[in-house]
Amino acid sequence: MATAVVTTERKNYLNAEYGIRSWLLTTDHKRIALLYLLSITFFFFIGGFFALLIRLELLTPAGDLLTADTYNKAFTMHGQIMVFFFLIPSIPAVLGNFLIPMMIGAKDLAFPRINLLSWYIYIVAGILYLHCLVSGGVDTGWTFYTPYSSLFSNTHVVEAGLAIFIVGFSSILTGLNFVVTIHRMRAPGLTWSRLPLFVWSHYATSIIMLLGTPVIAITLVLVVLERTLNLGIFDASRGGDPVLFQHLFWFYSHPAVYIMILPSMAVMSEIIPCFSRKRVFGYTFVAMSSIAIAAIGFLVWAHHMFVAGISLYSALVFSFLSFLVAVPSAVKVFNWTATMYKGSVSFSTPMLYAMGFIGLFTIGGLTGLFLATLGVDVHLHDTYFVIAHFHYVMVGGAVMGYLGGMHFWWPKISGRMYPEGWGRLAALIVFIGFNLTFFPQFLVGYLGMPRRYWQYPPEYQVYNVLSTAGASILAVGYLLPMVYLLWSLRYGKPAPDNPWQATGLEWRTASPPPTFNFDETPEVTWEAYEYETMPLPDEVTLER
Amino acid sequence: MSDRAGIGETPLAVEHEERPELRHHFADVEQQRNAATLGMWWFLGTEIMFFGGMFCAYLVYRRWYFPEFAASSRSLDLIVGTLNTAVLICSSLTVAMSVRAAQLGKRKLQVQLLLATIFFGLVFLGVKAYEWDNKYKEHHIPTFSFNAQDLIKDNQKLFGLDKLQNDPAKLQEREAEIQRRSQIFFSLYFALTGMHAIHMVIGVGIFAVITWMAHKGRFTPEYHTPLEIAGLYWHFVDIVWIYLFPLLYLIDRRPGA
Ligand SMILES: [Cu+2]
């Protein structure tokens, strides 16, 4: 019997070839996506380990678990690993890589070998960073601020800087591949106004990757040259300007926030219409808001520098522009909400993550406006309020979107259904754990606890205990999907081609898809999200 | 933002057999060529941003420390720099001509022109190395015992030192300031020309491969995309130098200023 099953199994990208070589030399965008999935999961746990050290240290007011120097390294490497080795590649390199060619009806990305190259660049950078980590690490904060990083730090700044310089090229090449693919590889009939919003959002993300990443690359090169060859560009003792470093650094690193959040918004725009059984509200506005975020996002960087001695007039302009960039984000939130309004909403796992995303991203975004307000920022700058704000955006936003997307497309990626009950439980645990971890940080930051200190006055302890308790719940919420998704690979129900009755092209091919995605190049004659013509999925019908 | 037009007009299977350079995931050669060209243009966009960070720093400091920048700029060898610019422009010309030779299907001419390009590229790098060596001998590298005494001696008026002759304390202070600030110019000079030289080295490597491909007869009048996009890269590196040359060599060379 068993052999009969094997022989009748459809050929797909997973069983097309076997062996380690077929993976390490693959140019199939779906396999490269899985290579990325494994690598970023690895780095997520290393970054998580440092988060654990930070939260344990902060459990008590005294600096007892780590020395001050080790604590500096812990938060530095937590930040650098999570930002550069997990969040930035997360959704684009895994879900974007896997889905964009399928969503536009192409056989692969435009440059499959460059796609593989980008993964190898990521791995080289990752190994270099790990080497830096085991040989003593780096303590500059993830921001590499000069003159500390260029003149004073005795840690491995050069190695860390080079690792992040190199990993930047993996992100540039991914962005390049996406832009060209979206321009040139669309199936016949798939006009720009019929593109799924996932693709629009990734298009905007790719533009930021292409135009922002080279700036941080050259900035890190200048810091490295300053340490190794004694150049003086950021050295105040020779007339150089350390604040120039901050300008160049944030010119990339503020848009980098949109590299993390736009792909998450991309996922939202697919999940929400599907589980509301409704066409997305205001398609054009959602699509254009992605472009607007990418464009305005490049013009707000100095809101990180209001207390760094920039002129009052430029601070006013940057404050205004930072308020302006909130508008397209709000357009998206309102449109998703309007999509759900009077829709047939079902609370499946991806939808739970999506709803969590809307709530948490809204809090993260609105607290960003507090920080963009000049007077308020003087009080809140470099406190835990900032930490809470950007974790609401990057973890509550980006990671929730990543997990929601992983569940939504898991049947397509693996060909198996994940256990729905466990999925919902994990989503709930993540939501509770997340809020318990980071909401107290808003309060303690408002009360004045500064970031990056390893000991603090005892009156702040209750907030830190709550936060550490929340972090341990959050950890359970992250480990659970690891366990049941792996379990489902073997024991999960085989997935139908379109388990959610979703509209995208990726659902019109097999689960898992064949190596070249479609047996025949599809011809698109419909608009995205025509949910009124789709039947309800089985699970959804059962529930009501 | 063009849509794919004309797909389905040629039977794909036939074209895939006839055109060995066509990769499996493209519908036709036209689409493949468009993708490669667009990819290179976007890559050049990232390169502009890469150099843009340094140009931005240059603009800021040039505005702050104009006398030091002008004096340091005068210490660069104008004749050698001009000759090198001419060499680089020649190399771009030979690249453009080699693309034309490929369009006309003249294989031998193509290879000769590409070899000339590589030759000009190497001459440029050699001259650049000679200039750097001169800077080393003049103690103008921020790393090795930097010394701005020669700049101070030659540019008394530009620095306003002639007005400080009877105030030794202020004179000494100003001279120390010049010693510090002129290092900023040379930091940028070496960062910018160094990055440009790295791009040249990569370009020479790329053109070595392209020359070999041309020698093997890989390029036909219908298909020479690799040559075209490598040419785009070469022209870009050339244009960066066209900006660097006036910014670094020609800040203010008016005699007696
Ligand atoms: Cu920002």
Image (spheres, helix red, strand yellow):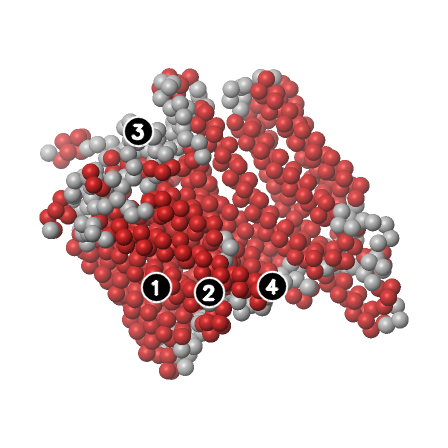
- Which residue does the numbered mark 3 point to in the structure image? A523
Say whether disc 1 or disc 3 marks the residue closer to the N-terminus: 1
Say whether disc 1 or disc 4 marks the residue closer to the N-terminus: 4
What element does badge 4 sit on?
helix
Q: Could you tell me if the residues under marks 1 and 3 are in contact, i.e. CB atoms within 8 Å?
A: no
Amino acid type of the residue tagged 1 in the rendering:
Ile
Amino acid type of the residue tagged 2 in the rendering:
Ala
**Residue A63 as seen in the image, left or right of residue B137:** left
Instruction: Report the front residue among A482 and A308.
Output: A308
Say whether disc 3 or disc 2 marks the residue closer to the N-terminus: 2
Against B125, residue A295 (above or below) is below
- Which residue does the numbered mark 2 point to in the structure image? A372
Say whether disc 4 or disc 2 marks the residue closer to the N-terminus: 4
The percent coordinates of residue A203 (x first, y second) are: 41, 43
The residue marked by circle 2 belongs to what chain? A
In the image, which is nearer the foreground, mark 1 or mark 4? Answer: 1
In the image, which is nearer the foreground, mark 4 or mark 2? Answer: 2
From mark 1 to mark 2, how far is it between C-alphas?
14 Å
**Residue B129 as seen in the image, left or right of residue A93:** right
- Name the image quarter holding residue A538: top left
In the image, which is nearer the foreground, mark 3 or mark 2? Answer: 2
What element does badge 3 sit on?
loop
- Label disc, if present, on residue B142 of the rendered structure: none
The percent coordinates of residue B54 (x first, y second) are: 62, 51
Labels 4 and 3 share a subunit = yes
Which residue of the protein is positioned furthest toward the right in this rendering? B166
The percent coordinates of residue A458 (x first, y second) are: 38, 82
Q: Could you tell me if the residues under marks 1 and 2 are in contact, i.e. CB atoms within 8 Å?
A: no
What element does badge 1 sit on?
helix
**Which residue occupies 45% across, 28% down?**
B32
Q: Quadrant of the N terminus of chain A?
A: top left
Say whether mark 3 is within 8 Å of ligand 1. Answer: no
